[in-house]
Amino acid sequence: MIKKVRSHITQNESLLFEKSSPGKTGYQLPALDVPAVDSQAALGAHNVRNEIEHFPEVSEVEVIRHFTRLSTWNYAIDLGLYPLGSCTMKYNPRVNELVARLEGLAWAHPYQPESLSQGSMEIMARLESALLEITGMDAITLQPAAGAHGELTGILLVRALLEKRGNPRKKILIPDSAHGTNPATAAIAGYAVENLRSNARGTVDLAELERMVDKDVAALMVTNPNTIGVFEEKITRAAEILHKKGALLYMDGANMNALVGVARPGDFGVDVMHLNLHKTFSTPHGGGGPGGGPVAVKKILEPFLPVPRLKRTRNKWTFDYKRPRSIGRVRAFYGNFGVIVRALAYILAHGGDGLRNATVDAVMNANYLRKKLEPYYDLPYTAPNMHEVVFSDDRQAKLGVRTGDIAKRLIDYGFHPYTVSFPLIVHGALMIEPTETESKDELDLFADAMISIAQEVETDPEMVRKAPHNTRTSRVDEVTAARRPVLRWTPEQPRTKTAD
Ligand SMILES: *Cc1c(COP(=O)(O)O)cnc(C)c1O
């Protein structure tokens, strides 16, 4: 009989604090060869600590092994399909990373004089014009650091324009399928949020819109294609309804992965929109790293864009700070420059045809999964879908298995779960976005796993409800974890528990 042992290396890694032993260090300094300074006298006794309590004392190799082991517990797009709907977890081409690490770019300092920053400024200018070509808009700022930040910038631009026209207005309309950042943005920008009911297709209900738009409405914020992966076919009509009443159309462009090279928001009535460089244009994300949320606008909003603006004078790039109507800065310096470099590298490496192909592949992949999984999972909105597909757990829920259970069982099959329970208009949502990254083989593996789980739900729902079974820890108590998180380690605490 083979005795089952648990590998202490990958399965039972302790906290760094628990590895600590007094006096261990990860460095060695040469002997002091200058006169010693009394730190207490120099800085004042109250500014100097004798020790930092509970600071882990470990060797260099212990630190390296600790974090390297932890990294093997992670799931990444470099390991396999990462179907997190709405998030566009596409592969991050290595050429982007190579370019972003070029010495002259990686070490460029924001306080460098403009005369020494012409190359970096040229990169920003080229990305601006590429994104304007892609979106069909008139002007753009690269400053916002993420999608939500772009939304806030965009709505502040709307407010600035309406204020100049004499009345900032009171309300923003937001469809019930919207991403949570949309209502948060409207509220932070000082607007009341009014919920716009979707129609049976899951898109904006034009009659309802017509009824709701009045002199108090500043804008409609709409995601297109929307969060159930459906294109707003009547969007130009929605824009007309808004414009007739002096309101604006904001497009959440997080789903541009389904439009690039095929359709341009500027051509279908959008006044202001943001892009997520870290989604559509392939900067690594998901770990909370830097992102990019450029905001593109029509001419009427250009005077209000954040300062500084790039300007070409006498064959040189300069930054223009003298823009009296600008809403001001929304971020230090010029945006996340490394992300800007990656986005331009991605765009240039693909070229126009390549970008269009990526879009077509993303849409085809989502539809391939839709067709393969439709016989097994309920699809409440059956409109032709674009780059993602949203099933409901209705069929499995009858056997007591919910979307969260299916997601956890997916981990046993080696896949990152899809997005669970969002958007809210789909009951028990399973939101799947494969992106263009995946080959047919990888899509088939994923579909097989999903089909196999659907069958397991029929035969052994209890097993699925208790998944995952192959992981280091199984179900955690999510309620306690949220209500009473342990954020600080003290020596009195019991050793971390690991599941058997
Ligand atoms: C991701 C996303 C956002 C927010 O973007 P962040 O970059 O995460 O701030 C907004 N709307 C939609 C539809 C999204 O998918």
Image (cartoon, helix red, strand yellow):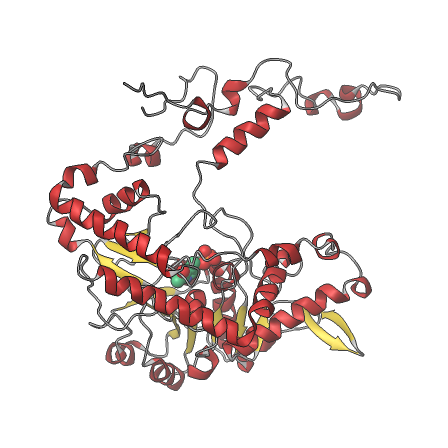
Q: Residue at x 29, y 76 (%)?
A: 212
Residue 29 locus on image (x, y percent): 77, 22
On the question of residue 221 being in view, the answer is yes
Residue 345 locus on image (x, y percent): 61, 64
Q: Nearer the viewer, residue 164 or 148?
A: 148
| Residue 435 in the figure: left or right of residue 375 | right
| Residue 286 in the figure: left or right of residue 113 | left
Residue 451 locus on image (x, y percent): 22, 52
Residue 243 to residue 250: above or below: below
Residue placed farthest to the top in the image? 22
Residue 233 to residue 493: above or below: below
Q: Nearer the viewer, residue 466 or 436?
A: 436
Q: Which quarter of the rendered image does ligand 1 occupy?
A: bottom left
Query: Looking at the rendering, in which quadrant would you find the N terminus?
Result: top left
Residue 253 to residue 235: above or below: above
Q: Residue at x 47, y 19 (%)?
A: 490
Residue placed farthest to the right in the image? 34
